[in-house]
Image: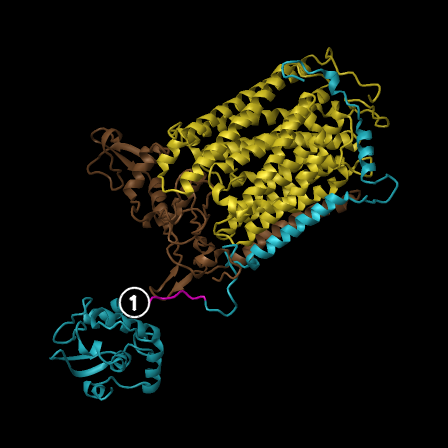
Chain colours: A yellow, B cyan, C brown
Amino acid sequence: MSHPPSQAPAAEVSPFDAPARWPLALLAGSALGWLVLSSLLALVTAIQLHTPSFLADCSALTHGRAQAARETAFLYGWAGNAGVGLGLWILGRLGGNPLRALNWAVVGTVFWNLGLLAGMVGIATGSMTGFAGLQVPRALQPVLVAAFCAMALPGVLAWAGRKREGTYAAQWYAAAALFLLPWFWTATQAVLLWSPLRGVVQTVAASWHTQSLVSLWLMPLALAAAYFIVPKQTGKLLPGYESAPLAFWTLIVAGGWTFGRHLIGGPFPAWIPTMAVVAQCLLLFHFLVVALNFRQLFAGGSLTLQYLRFGLVAFLLTGLLETITSFRGAAVHTQFTLLVPAREQLALQGALSMFLFGGLVYQFPRIFGRDWTLPTFVSGHHSLYMLGVVISVLSLSWAGLAQDALLNHSQTPFAEILAQLKTPLLLHTAGQFALLAGNLLLLFAFLRSAAASCCREEGAVALRPASSAS
Amino acid sequence: MSASQRPDPSQDRSPLSDDALQAGHEQIIGKQPDEKGRYRLLPLNLLFLFSGLIFVGGTYLGRFSGHFHPKVFNEYGQPPKAGAVAAVAVDPLVLGKNVYVQVCAACHQPTGLGLPPAFPPLAGSEWVSGSEERLIRIVLHGLQGPIKVMGVEYIGAMPAAGPGSGYNLSPEKVAAVLTYIRKEWGGVEAPVAAGKVAEVRGKEGNRQPWTAAELEKIP
Amino acid sequence: MKNRPLFLLGLFLAVLTSWAGFVLGSHGQLGSLTPFFDEADGQSHPARLPGLAARGQLVYADLGCVACHTQQVRRPGFGNDQARGWGERQSVARDYIFHAQPQLGASRLGPDLMNLAGRNPQAASADDLHRLLYTGSAAHPAFPFLYETREIAGESSRHAVRLTGTTAPKAGSEVVATERAQTLVAYLLNVNTGFEFPEARPLPAKSAASPEATK
């Protein structure tokens, strides 16, 4: 059913949300399911770090495969589904028209999730590709690309068919993310899986892909959610917004260049890590502008804003740490140690996930027209997640610093290094446990709320459309 | 808002509608629906910062890029000069030993002791520790007929091993093997130069294998 | 960003430039590296992995060993890879031209695996590796699914793993390495950076920080 779009009421329940409810709920629900799966795998791999014999008999969960599965479930399953769901919703809302081609999105989502499930089985049985961030068995990858194109179609149509001439930052980020992924993913598949390049160029391409996945696909979707929610929740326009276009283009141009900081000191020509340092310096501008735009977040506010605030702080911290550690003087100490996963956790769990959580928590009541039925669970998730991320990142950093001293400045044998890292690694496991618990709470809250909405549609207590914009 | 309180749904009520959101922000970047796109200037300090970051990046790139050369793996390195022969320095003793084992040891034995009565020893031989000129000629063109080594006469036929022969050893390899045997069994540290071998070859050209008498005429 | 096609074109070009510059650019520079022919021993380096070892690389990739191990030796000033005896020189691009899928790695929870067979003072042997893979250790997971425990029929298998103590199987049985384990160990023992290429030579120590550093 469609409402006449002539007068979009100044309300938090837009008339375009209800028709899109179930496709978006499918995306959000699958995202949370994958999140729980990836947290479970993260717990398994965290335990294996300090107790290598954990589940060693099970060939499907040997450490390398478990890591590949965890990463796939997190990036493509959780962040992919959640990001696309938010992106479609935001593009629809800001486009001023009801979302079209939603059947495509549903079919796409189903195939995306089925493809990923098959991919997980493939990884567990030994067909993973061996490239980090691209582990899904190679025969399934074109299926996933096609499914993604179907998922993204409503978003691109909503952006192209929008009513206003100009666009807002959330639209740039969301449209860019939805548009770019199929292109660079196909290019990567071509040079790595179908017609592999020779020697270390494969590592260059794989590293480029993983970086682009985060900088050009996932982070923009998360930023789109933030750009949409912050002004709507605070009721004020974003300060410093005039720099946002330049910051956006800086991210798009230089975002994929920073992969080289992982390749420093390796068998790669020196210009690759050097370009990464240059790009990282340029990206500081993007981080600064995002900080300026979202500075109202530091004052806190509703639960959604609290999620976004944590995400923002983690995002800025990630930018700073990535810049510092891309220089050779610091990279000597951090490369190959646990400081790298620590920074990754901060970026992916601290920044990316928190932005996406803020988005989902904000989106749910609006597309369902009713509030969360278990709001304490959602707050509980927030607290547990913050706790988990802080503990995980700090403990991994502690382990990484200790490891650097032992690995790079002494001849300590590896068995002893791991024995000395046991305490921080146990803490890290505790952090992962907190994350898993929080994610279970959120999944349960979502399912409960969605079921409540589904089963009691007529008697649902809907959020009243606001009659004024105050 | 504390985590234990139920979030108040009305707090989520947005004071900004989607339209107001977009209209307000478009005004900030100076775009009106009916105007051609015109960007307002960025605040000056941010513009300076951006330019500064580009400048820093460019300087870093200029210093540490190794001129984008594929063989510069250390960012402090410089690309190899065009025309510089970046050949691996071959250790003549290693090369010489390999050549000796492949070519000479069959007759002169790996120990250098030879096999009387056909193959004279190299260990302790006055021919090996003696004149370079004679030794080079023996290897380049071979030796026929009787030869006295350490007071013992040997009759043998040593084939030529230099360029153009069956073994076709390059002047570098001839020099290397001679360096090796002189160091190993002749007690002579000074290496034989490949240039010297080439010079001798140039002087003598192609010729029949030497006899001992002919060689003794050469200083 | 009013113009719809222009916006999409801008995005596309930005990413195309990035991909072309880095991926195609590196391929242009490194994709046609040739092996280096050494006059001294008449061989070209690097050597291709022998067939068993090349299949072992697939096992290495599908087990995900790359999650904890690297296969790159860094230059002298960068960490203490060479002090640990992992290699005599840094790895360069030419070392990997005959690897079907270089497993360079990004994490050193375990030691670097380049040059395992050539380590001083302790070169790894096939026996040691099989033992480690079967039993694991305090710092290394076990991979018992790569091995088969079976009755000794007649004489003991050529690929039996020598085990003692509590890890040994019961009398009359032996632990035999499956083909996956054999190929994996062959791979680990054949991965090396044996030859000193010109581009792998370190910069002169004194001028490492000076602008006039020469190769």
Question: Which chain is disc 1 placed on?
Answer: B
x%, y% of residue C204? 44, 59
Residue in the foreground of this view, choosing between C50 and A38? A38
Residue in the foreground of this view, choosing between A90 and A122? A90
x%, y% of residue A60? 43, 31
Count of number-bearing discs: 1
x%, y% of residue A147? 62, 35
Residue in the foreground of this view, choosing between A328 and A445? A328
- Quarter occupied by the N terminus of chain A: top right
Helix, strand or loop: magenta stretch: loop
Query: Label 1 belongs to which residue?
Result: B93
- Quarter occupied by the C terminus of chain A: top right
Residue extending farthest right: B34
In the image, what residue type sits under mark 1? Leu
The question of residue A367 being in magenta is answered with no
Left or right: A35 in relation to A399: right
The residue segment tinted magenta is B86-93
Rendered position, A200 above or below C39: above
Q: Residues within 10 Å of mark 1 (few under 14, many from 20)?
A: many
Q: Is residue A99 visible?
A: no
Residue extending farthest top: A459
Left or right: B94 in relation to C100: left
Rendered position, A57 above or below A143: above
Q: Residue at x 37, y 38 (%)?
A: A414
x%, y% of residue C203? 46, 58
Among the 4 quarters of the image, the one containing residue A412: top left
Q: Is residue B165 visible?
A: yes
Among the 4 quarters of the image, the one containing residue B46: top right
Mark 1 element type? helix
Residue in the foreground of this view, choosing between A98 and A302? A302
The question of residue B92 being in magenta is answered with yes
